[in-house]
């Protein structure tokens, strides 16, 4: 049960919200989409249910193939924000707390659901007033393994620490201003969480950012069927060695994925399955959304987008920044026959110089069996241990 001062504070917060909305054009949307029950439920929200000893986030025993220099070099964890168990625990509570949004209806987890690989399955996600986001939600597994360390499809956030504060303030997503948030989070269950994480109970925007980032960076996936195969073959080259736990089709898909024919791995390389930076994969001949280019203004990055990890990709449909492909079959067909001749199309997706039609978008000429195999392989990146791990789950649920 919330204590009396926090109830008083919350009731005052409601009046503040209502007063603000009197002057707001979106007032009617607001009342359509938010019921008093929403408020009431949040006011009576029980404190989070946390273990006496925090879960282990800081010392994850990653498999050996994660602990090699090329993979560790991709890790974007800054020196001043190493993961601690207490920091990630605070981050987890913030991530699931609907008090983080203006009208207490939306948490980060509303659009980043654990069972959906921390994405959601809508083309565009619904924000605190019922409005839609401009792009498709992104899965968060292995966010720490992205070398240039930038976030969002258009990489407009320079760091994760910067990124995590942006949805909070976004007018579609959570609609909160940070000064108000700091006051609003003055809820008794946060005192011990801030104290354990940062030494005292003071709430600051910076601490919110650090803790959320720690929680997100702790989300590493290493228990998929693919990982079982990696463990099973030991030191043998994984690109070409069939995995004993794979079906024939999954092994064919793996071989194709790492082949020069498809070159999928040149952009989505193992074991994190992400690229070091943004690319153009030929979705359109003329971009509607210029992605990274719209942020940097650099002509060569027009139509380029972040290549985030394909881990748990089966769980995060629809696909691409605009959610244009409903299924993985459609994605594979894009690379097989649909790549468009955008001026910034990556050379990896063009015919090599000494081939017929040099420089034209590459066609893979895959058989139906091969297309199915590629999809089957992508599904071996689904990690049920990750999607069911209680340390990433909603602490406000019983
Ligand atoms: C209303 C839905 C919604 C809410 C709420 C939301 N997000 Fe997102 N999130 C998105 C969408 C959509 C994108 C992609 C937006 C883009 O690239 O322009 C995204 C992207 C991200 C990314 C970038 C991932 C990457 O690899 O670059 C991170 C990290 C993230 N969100 C974390 C959070 C956190 C933390 C919160 C809470 C403070 C949050 N999100 C709240 C919808 C949401
Ligand atoms: C030149 C680099 C490149 C190559 C090669 C490449 N991709 Fe991609 N891939 C990208 C980029 C960039 C995106 C994101 C594009 C966007 O949303 O605008 C992407 C997105 C995807 C997505 C959707 C991700 C999501 O979260 O929605 C899947 C699935 C995918 N690629 C699979 C593959 C497969 C399978 C292959 C091989 C047949 C492949 N890719 C080859 C660059 C590449």
Image (cartoon, grey):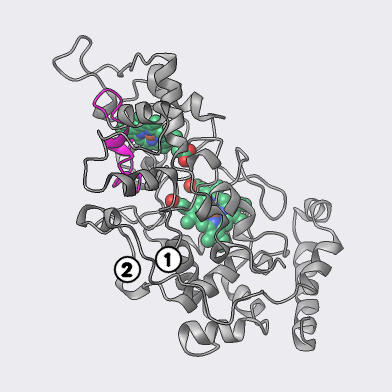
**From the viewer's perspective, is the residue at label 2 or at label 1 nearer?**
2
Q: Quadrant of the C terminus?
A: bottom right
Dot 2 falls on a residue whose secondary structure is loop
Cα distance between the residues tagged 2 and 1: 9 Å
Q: Is residue 16 above or below residue 238?
A: below
How crowded is the residue under tag 1: few (<14 C-alpha within 10 Å), some, or many (20+)?
Answer: many
Circle 1 residue? 161
Identity of the residue furthest to the right in this view: 36
Residue in view at x 43 percent, y 43 percent: 225
Quadrant in which ligand 2 is drawn: top left
The reply to whether residue 58 is in sight is yes
Q: Is residue 299 above or below residue 169?
A: above
Give the image location of residue 202, x and y in percent.
54, 87
Magenta region's main secondary structure? loop
Give the image location of residue 76, x and y in percent.
32, 60
Circle 2 residue? 78
Identity of the residue furthest to the left in this view: 354
The reply to whether residue 172 is in sight is no
> Within the magenta stretch, is there residue 43?
no
Magenta span of residues? 259-280
With 124 as the anchor, is 165 left or right in this view? Answer: left
Q: Quadrant of residue 186?
A: bottom right
Give the image location of residue 281, x and y in percent.
36, 30
Comes first in the chain, label 2 or label 1: 2
Q: Is residue 240 above or below residue 201?
A: above
With 204 as the anchor, is 26 left or right in this view? Answer: right
> Within the magenta stretch, is there residue 260?
yes
Q: Which mark is residue 343?
A: none
Give the image location of residue 387, x and y in percent.
55, 53
Badges 2 and 1: C-beta atoms under 8 Å apart?
Answer: yes
How crowded is the residue under tag 2: few (<14 C-alpha within 10 Å), some, or many (20+)?
Answer: few
């Amino acid at each position: 049960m919330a204590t009396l001062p926090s109830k008083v504070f919350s009731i005052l917060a409601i009046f503040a919200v209502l007063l603000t909305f009197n002057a707001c054009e979106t007032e009617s949307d607001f009342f359509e989409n938010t019921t008093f029950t929403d408020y009431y439920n949040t006011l009576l929200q029980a404190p989070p249910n946390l273990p006496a000893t925090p879960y282990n986030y800081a010392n994850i025993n990653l498999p050996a193939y994660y602990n090699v220099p090329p993979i560790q070099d991709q890790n974007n964890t800054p020196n001043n924000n190493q993961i601690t168990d207490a920091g990630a625990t605070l981050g987890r509570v913030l991530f699931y707390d609907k008090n983080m949004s203006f009208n207490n209806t939306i948490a980060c987890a509303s659009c980043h659901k654990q069972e959906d690989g921390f994405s959601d399955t809508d083309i565009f996600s619904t924000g605190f007033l019922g409005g839609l986001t401009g792009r498709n939600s992104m899965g968060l597994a292995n966010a720490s393994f992205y070398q240039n360390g930038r976030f969002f499809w258009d990489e407009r956030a320079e760091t994760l620490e910067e990124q995590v504060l942006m949805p909070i303030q976004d007018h579609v997503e959570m609609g909160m201003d940070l000064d108000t948030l700091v006051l609003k989070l003055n809820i008794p269950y946060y005192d011990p969480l801030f104290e354990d994480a940062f030494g005292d109970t003071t709430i600051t925007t910076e601490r919110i950012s650090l803790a959320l980032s720690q929680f997100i960076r702790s989300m590493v996936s290493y228990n998929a069927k693919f990982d079982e195969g990696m463990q099973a073959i030991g030191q043998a080259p994984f690109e070409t060695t069939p995995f004993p736990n794979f079906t024939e089709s999954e092994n064919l898909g793996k071989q194709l994925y790492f082949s020069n024919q498809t070159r999928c791995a040149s952009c989505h390389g193992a074991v994190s399955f992400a690229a070091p930076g943004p690319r153009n994969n030929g979705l359109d001949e003329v971009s509607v959304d210029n992605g990274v280019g719209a942020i940097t203004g650099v002509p060569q990055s027009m139509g380029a987008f972040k290549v985030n990890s394909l881990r748990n990709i089966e769980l995060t449909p629809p696909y691409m920044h605009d959610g244009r492909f409903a299924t993985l079959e459609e994605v594979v067909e894009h690379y097989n026959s649909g790549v468009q001749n955008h001026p910034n199309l990556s050379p990896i997706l063009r015919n090599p110089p000494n081939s017929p039609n040099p420089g034209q978008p590459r066609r893979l000429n895959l058989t139906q069996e091969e297309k199915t195999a590629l999809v089957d392989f992508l599904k071996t990146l689904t990690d049920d241990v990750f999607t069911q791990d209680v340390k990433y789950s909603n602490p406000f649920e019983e």
